Image (cartoon, rainbow, N blue to C red):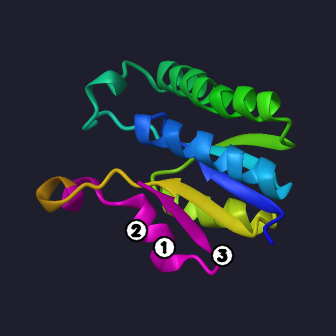
Amino acid sequence: MFKHILIPTDGSEASRSAIQNCIAFAKEIGAKITGLHVIPEFHIFTYQPEMLEDTRQQFAKDAVTQAKKYLNEIEVAAKEAGVNYDIIYMVSDQPYEVIIKIAEDKKCDLITMASHGRKGLKGFLLGSEAQKVLTHSQIPVLIFR
């Protein structure tokens, strides 16, 4: 059975739900979890209004604060459930690559992710990190909808 589960989060409601389900699953099977948030690289232009940045330093500070907030949700839930955990954040514009690399480096045997269900133009423009992880990972992936 699974011994170490990677839980990437983007802070969305879908991710929050997946975190709760995954931690319950990890507790049931006695698995350790690693929470991961991938911070986007600094760009002058962005498609997310809340990420408009003045300087690289301010962006980095705000992004780390946000990452810690997202990962704190995993930490609190894991502690409450009595599940052994680790948390990490990385910087990259290719979250799926980081997700797979961290899963391999940490010797995770399962990746769990939320699916946002983006379709059409929005799905094309924003992409689906879950789909990319499914396509490129050699590690099993469990998708929560």
Q: Is residue 28 magenta?
A: no
The residue at the far left in this view is: 121
| 65 or 21, nearer to the observer | 21
Residue on which disc 3 sits? 139
| Image x and y of residue 77, in percent | 71, 31
Q: Secondary structure at mark 2?
A: helix
Residue corresponding to mark 2? 131
Query: Magenta residues, as a range?
Result: 123-145
Mark 1 vs 3, N-terminal side: 1
**Image point 42% across, 34% down: which residue?**
13
Residue 12 vertical position relative to residue 51 in the rendered view, above or below = below
Q: Is residue 58 left or right of residue 111?
A: left
For the residues bearing labels 1 and 2, Cβ distance under 8 angstroms:
yes
Residue 134, numbered label: 1
Hey, what amino acid is under mark 1? Leu
Left-right relation of 37 to 49: right
Q: Earlier in the sequence, mark 3 or mark 2?
A: 2
